[in-house]
Image (cartoon, rainbow, N blue to C red):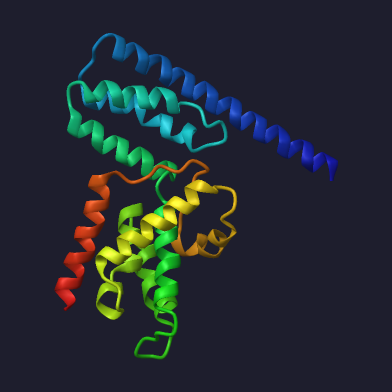
Amino acid sequence: MKDNYDELLYMFSYGIEMEKKIANGNIKRLNTAIKNCCRDIKVLDSLADPLFDTMLGLSGIGERTYLRFIKYLETFNPAEAKERYEMYEDSMGYKIHLAYVAARLAKDIHKGQVDKTGKDYFEGHLATVGRKGFSWKEKTVGFLHDVAEDTEYTVKDIIRLLKRGLKEWKASLNEQDWKEDFDEIVGQYPNERLHLPTKEEWNEIEEALNLLNSRTA
């Protein structure tokens, strides 16, 4: 048993060291490119993208440099910088918390509803739609796309309840045991850090819910 533990510990330590070597090499090259005012986005991406592997890996190294890259990119191409920042937040799980709140809200609101086959409506339909979303926003809308049509709640009500749920989570990050019931349903674990959606992102979610409701009305 001890031999297996020692081997596992060695492999873990070795993996961290390898990640650090990879990250440090890319960090150095990316910092040099920024210092030299490189504006070739393909070149910058080729140096920055590998940092995702280490940021999400065992070492967690490279995040500070990746954010520096985004800040630099913003100086000459704000649209590309925004796209990469949103991808960064999505990949790191900084905003997936809202999808958890949405799934929980949808399950509560649709409680007792069944589909045509008699199966629980959330488990049989909404959970599948939400899980298939590629981003935290798509998942959030997926879980809640039928609420405005099938219940007495309006889209405004839904947004208000989402904001309340997210505010409560942020106020007590370590007291959200209920989220474990939705890990498999959401399909991405929430980061210990929680980034609140921007006003623009809230508007996008509200617009999407209104659009889906008007299409099925």
- Residue 157 position by quadrant: bottom left
64 vs 59, nearest the viewer:
64
- Residue most extreme to the right: 2
13 vs 141, nearest the viewer:
141
Residue drawn at (20%, 72%) of the image:
213
Residue 184, image x, y percentages: 50, 62
179 vs 185, nearest the viewer:
179
| Residue 189 in sight here | no
Residue 114, image x, y percentages: 40, 86
In the image, residue 10 sits, relative to residue 28, either above or below, namely below
Residue 44, image x, y percentages: 28, 23
For this view, does 34 lie left or right of residue 175? left
100 vs 80, nearest the viewer:
100
Residue drawn at (52%, 37%) of the image:
57
- Residue 165 position by quadrant: bottom left
In the image, residue 73 sits, relative to residue 134, either above or below, namely above
In the image, residue 120 sits, relative to residue 44, either above or below, namely below
Count of numbered circles in the view: 0
| Residue 69 in sight here | yes
- Residue 94 position by quadrant: top left
Please identify the quadrant where the C terminus is shown.
bottom left
Residue drawn at (44%, 80%) of the image:
111
Residue drawn at (30%, 9%) of the image:
35
Residue 5, image x, y percentages: 78, 41
